[in-house]
Image (cartoon, rainbow, N blue to C red):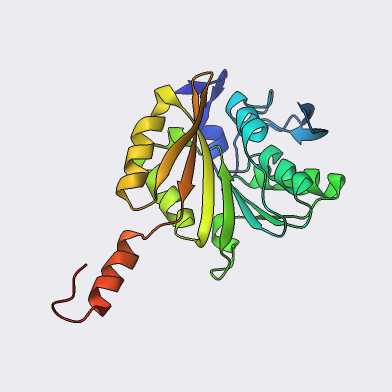
Amino acid sequence: MPRYRGRVAGHYFSEQPDIASDVRRLALHLPDLSLELDADRGVFSSDQIDAGSRLLMLEAVRPSPGATVLDVGCGYGPIACVAALRSPESTVWAVDVNERARALTAANAQRLGLNVRVAAPDDVPDDVRFDHIVSNPPIRIGKPSLHALLTRWLRRLTPDGVAELVVLKHLGSDSLAKWLNGQGWPTERQLSRGGYRILRVHAGSTTDEVTAAAADRPPGAEA
């Protein structure tokens, strides 16, 4: 199994990590705010704030007032908490398959007095749509699982919604952008720095929606 930052990568993809808990508090300093977050073993980047997540928080994660925001793969909640701090009028959802990660995010948000709704992926109501998705997605789960994860949530963008994703170049950011464009989500490189890309993904017609629209057209109508 591949290793990451000296830890087995599979731990933080599990619903219940099989590594002993060891909570530690991390400081996050950005130009406009500072906060402290509790992290734990078995959760992504528990030793320090991940460089990709930091870049995303420095250059993006600025929801419009009143937006409905989603952090996919929230970990212990740095991105979700920053989104909620910058846009207190917004509703921020934080989802993760990792039970320990969800507990940490909920505790961090509560301690900071933030409007963050923490949920397992299957517990987000089907009728909730998102104006803004922000994520340091779990690239190491493999392409099929990553594509399924992104498809699941990008389909729930509002018509004018956008997603901001941070991905390492050497882990396939450019091929991911190509795949997203091919699936009907217009994607552009918003920023490239330190080996990372921030991809800005716009709501678009998914394959299912295109098929449904074609089925509704009268015979002979142009696509």
Quick one: 79 or 37, which is closer to the camera? 79
Residue in the image at 26% along x and 68% along y = 211
Q: Quadrant of residue 218?
A: bottom left
Q: Is residue 38 left or right of residue 71?
A: right
Which quarter of the rendered picture does the C terminus lie within?
Answer: bottom left
Q: Residue at x 57, y 22 (%)?
A: 7
Q: Position of residue 34 (x, y in %)?
A: 82, 31
Q: Quadrant of the N terminus?
A: top left
For residue 126, above or below residue 46: below
**Can residue 43 be seen at all in this image of the molecule?**
no
Single out the residue that lies furthest toward the bottom.
218
Q: Nearer the viewer, residue 10 or 72?
A: 72
The answer, for residue 113, to whether it is visible in the render is yes
- How many marks the image carries: the answer is 0
Residue 148, position in %: x, y? 39, 50
Residue at screen point 78% across, 55% down: 115
Residue positioned 57% across, 59% down in the render:
130
Q: Is residue 89 left or right of residue 180?
A: right
The percent position of residue 56, horizontal first and vertical second, equals 61, 33
> For residue 188, which quarter of the picture?
top left
Q: Position of residue 73 (x, y in %)?
A: 57, 43
**In this picture, is 63 found above or below 123?**
above
Query: Relative to residue 187, is residue 130 drawn left or right?
Result: right
* Residue positioned most to the front: 222
The quarter holding residue 125 reads: bottom right
